[in-house]
Image (cartoon, grey):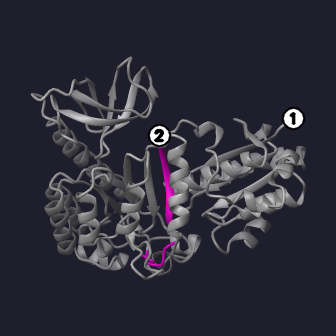
């Protein structure tokens, strides 16, 4: 009987990539996935603490596992991700003594070593590894996709781990450690393996992805990485996030604008539309500098899909300062706003020095104002695509329709008996909403304008 595992994941794309990587390693070592944690021999909770709600969910999951572990002491329980961070394991061990293994973000070695030392790796795999220890073999970049992700069209690939910027609201530097870039050969080997298994689109990930390679020197940077990934056989689309306004260079923009494979989607958060709030956040730029950045992006790519992040209710944010944010969103009309309410995080500068003085009800009202505004903006922008033809990379089949995205990240649904997952298809848009569109397959006739959006 094969050994079994279950991974529960919450949080960002980096956590999703970490969970995929761990699943690949466990399956290579002879484990198979199961749906329920209670039925698994190895249970991993991959956690997030960027917001209190995410941390509370992880604690709730741990509480449910405590009784299961007591009834099945041979079960291995592992805690992974930002809840563990770089230094939190000792305190968590006291709080949750039934947890066997604590794993910092993106570091699967503690669990692999635990399982290896207890002889829980598959004996067949041990024999196959031969002179090369299985403990080392499972660390390869070139491993099969997990059973449940085989056939996937898209995949996330971390390229920059950690962050050293230390915005006053952000817990990431304290939990994921200092910024460090992965070697380019490792990244390319991983993408080549994914492409060979049918992945057609990769998203390169970093807390500040624009800073890729700055710790290497010698000309290794994000532009070079983007070009190298885009040249890999089988890869049709490349995306990257998250950028920081201070590090978005003309070279990056020129690289994106000149490529048919690198998608013209730029994720560049502003966080607030008022200079005093930005200064308290320690973001390192002004609203006017951000405006000029957006103009610069659009000078390279007039139709670029620009995404941003907004935090409402940051300590000290007055109603007037919030209105500045509303006006900026109305002015810039960006493609997407990732919106959140300020949540005090332990050890951050804001938590130590700034009282959380915006009432929760006010935060919610501000959140709703911006949500409603952005929904209207997206609805207006998408209406212009009715009757137009767009290119869609088909990701999966959902509720009787094929589902995929345009190079600009717009979600499109359509029906077509000829289509298969992974196809790149021209679709004529018949209906649009703020967050998705519906169309029908379009013949590539010359009288139909093709908008690659």
| Residue under label 2 | 153
Name the spot of residue 358 as percent of width and height, x first: 37, 65
Q: In percent of the image, x 18 and y 39: which residue is there?
A: 451
> Would you say residue 41 sits in the magenta stretch?
no
Q: In percent of the image, x 42 and y 82: which residue is there?
A: 218
- Look at the image and tell me whether residue 105 can be seen: yes
Name the spot of residue 107 as percent of width and height, x first: 66, 64
Find the residue positioned furthest to the top. 417
Report the magenta residues as a range: 154-168
Instruction: Tell me: 152 left or right of 77.
Output: left
Q: Nearer the viewer, residue 53 or 253?
A: 253
Q: Quadrant of the C terminus?
A: top left
Q: Nearer the viewer, residue 37 or 417?
A: 417
| Residue under label 1 | 1
- Look at the image and tell me whether residue 50 can be seen: no
Label 2 vs 1, first from the N-terminus: 1
- Answer few, some or many: residues within 10 Å of disc 1's Cα (few below 14, many 20 plus, some between 14 and 19): few
- Answer few, some or many: residues within 10 Å of disc 2's Cα (few below 14, many 20 plus, some between 14 and 19): many
Q: Could you tell me how many numbered marks the image carries?
A: 2
Q: In percent of the image, x 13 and y 62: which residue is there?
A: 299
Name the spot of residue 156 as percent of width and height, x first: 49, 52
Instruction: Tell me: 253 left or right of 166.
Output: left
> Would you say residue 167 sits in the magenta stretch?
yes
Q: Nearer the viewer, residue 438 or 174?
A: 438
Name the spot of residue 233 as percent of width and height, x first: 43, 48
Q: Is residue 397 above or below residue 155?
A: above
* CB contact under 8 Å: marks 2 and 1: no
């Amino acid at each position: 009987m094969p050994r079994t595992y279950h991974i529960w994941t919450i949080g960002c794309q980096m956590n999703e990539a970490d969970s995929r990587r761990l699943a690949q390693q466990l399956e290579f070592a002879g484990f198979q996935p199961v749906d329920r944690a209670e039925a698994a021999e190895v249970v991993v909770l991959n956690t997030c603490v960027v917001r209190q709600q995410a941390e509370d969910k992880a604690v709730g999951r741990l509480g449910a596992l405590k009784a299961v572990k007591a009834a099945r002491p041979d079960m291995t329980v592992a805690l992974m991700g930002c809840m563990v961070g770089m230094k939190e394991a000792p305190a968590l061990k006291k709080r949750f003594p039934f947890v066997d293994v604590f794993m910092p973000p993106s570091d699967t070695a503690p669990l692999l070593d635990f399982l290896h030392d207890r002889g829980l790796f598959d004996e067949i795999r041990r024999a196959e590894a031969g002179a090369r220890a299985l403990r080392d073999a499972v660390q390869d970049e070139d491993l099969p996709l997990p059973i449940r992700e085989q056939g996937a069209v898209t995949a996330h690939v971390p390229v920059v781990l950690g962050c050293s910027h230390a915005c006053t609201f952000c817990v990431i530097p304290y939990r994921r450690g200092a910024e460090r870039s992965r070697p380019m050969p490792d990244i390319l080997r991983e993408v080549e393996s994914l492409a060979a298994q049918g992945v057609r689109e990769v998203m390169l990930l970093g807390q500040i992805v624009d800073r890729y390679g700055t710790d290497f020197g010698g000309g290794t940077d994000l532009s070079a990485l983007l070009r190298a990934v885009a040249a890999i056989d089988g890869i049709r689309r490349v995306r990257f996030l998250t950028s920081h306004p201070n590090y978005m260079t003309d070279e990056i923009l020129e690289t994106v604008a000149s490529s048919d494979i690198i998608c013209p989607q730029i994720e560049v958060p502003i966080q607030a539309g008022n200079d005093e709030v930005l200064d308290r956040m320690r973001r390192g730029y002004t609203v006017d500098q951000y405006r000029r950045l957006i103009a610069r992006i659009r000078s390279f790519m007039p139709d670029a899909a620009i995404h941003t992040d907004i935090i409402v209710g940051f300590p000290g944010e007055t109603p007037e300062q919030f209105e500045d944010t509303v006006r900026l969103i109305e002015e810039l009309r960006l493609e997407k706003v990732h919106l959140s309410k300020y949540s005090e995080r332990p050890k951050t500068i804001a938590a130590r020095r700034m009282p959380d003085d915006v009432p929760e009800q006010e935060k919610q009202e501000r959140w709703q104002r911006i949500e409603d505004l952005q929904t209207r903006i997206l609805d207006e922008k998408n209406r212009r695509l009715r009757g137009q033809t767009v290119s869609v990379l088909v990701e999966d089949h959902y509720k009787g329709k094929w589902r995929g995205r345009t190079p600009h990240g717009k979600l499109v649904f359509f029906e077509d008996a000829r289509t298969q997952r992974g196809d790149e298809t021209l679709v004529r848009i018949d209906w649009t909403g703020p967050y998705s569109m519906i169309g029908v397959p379009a013949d590539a006739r010359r009288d139909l304008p093709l908008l690659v959006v």
